Image (cartoon, grey):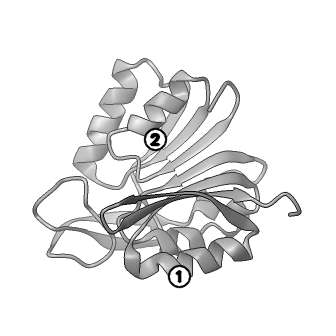
Amino acid sequence: MKENTVFVDVGAFLGGYAIRAAKKGAKVLAFEPSKSNYQLLERNIQINDLGNKITAFKIAVGSAREKRPLYSDGLFYATLSLVSNTMVEEYVDVYPLDEMIASELNIDLLKINAEGAEIEVLKGADKVLKRTKYVMVEVQPENKKEVYSLMKQYGFKVLDINMRGKILNILFHRAKNQ
């Protein structure tokens, strides 16, 4: 990330990636559905005086516009997800990325950390993916094959894979012939 690049952060959490990208000069669109995490994200943006670089949205990103439960495992506040878990934390608005990102905006890096809902995020980003250079996705083991398949359909190839336990962090890049 550098001056005048565009970074889209799906599952921004408290803003660690968003803040670092904005400090390097990137324009950042950050999406965080959890009310408490969103408040901390907003506070971090304010503390770092990055309100002119980061636009934050308190919504979940998915494949369709709807209202859905945001689930918690009751153990850790970073693992909230649209995927059914132990208990409902709150209800959130869900929007596809294609409805949230202006059609003329080209994206340098799209980061997706949706705690198991990564396929839904990708399915709601048809137009966005066609204008994106790199995609970094945290992939749950059960979603690996479908994520690979979807990314291949959009002309992406694997650039790097990092394993954290059973979770894969995969960096895709747009193939040169696309």
* Mark-to-mark CA distance, 1 and 2: 31 Å
Q: Residues within 10 Å of mark 2 (few under 14, many from 20)?
A: many
Q: Is residue 65 visible?
A: no
Question: Which amino acid lies under the numbered mark 2 shown in the image of this protein?
Answer: Ala
Question: Which amino acid lies under the numbered mark 1 shown in the image of this protein?
Answer: Lys
Residue 88: image quadrant is bottom left
Q: In the rendered view, tell whether residue 100 sits above or below residue 83.
A: above
The residue positioned 21% from the left and 76% from the top of the image is 85
The residue positioned 34% from the left and 37% from the top of the image is 41
Q: Residue furthest right?
A: 177
Q: Residues within 10 Å of mark 1 (few under 14, many from 20)?
A: few
Q: In the rendered view, tell whether residue 127 sits above or below residue 104.
A: below
Q: Between 118 and 29, which is closer to the camera in this rendering? A: 118
Q: Is residue 79 left or right of residue 10?
A: left
Q: Is residue 164 left or right of residue 157?
A: left
Specify the quadrant that holds the C terminus: bottom right
Residue under circle 1? Answer: 145
Query: Where in the figure is residue 90, as x and y percent of width and height?
Result: 22, 64
Asked if the residue under mark 2 is in contact with the one under mark 1, i.e. CB atoms within 8 Å, the reply is no
Residue under circle 2? Answer: 56
Q: In the rendered view, tell whether residue 77 sits above or below residue 7.
A: below
Q: Is residue 138 left or right of residue 35?
A: right
Residue 177: image quadrant is bottom right
Specify the quadrant that holds the N terminus: top right
Query: Where in the figure is residue 77, as x and y percent of width and height?
Result: 19, 53
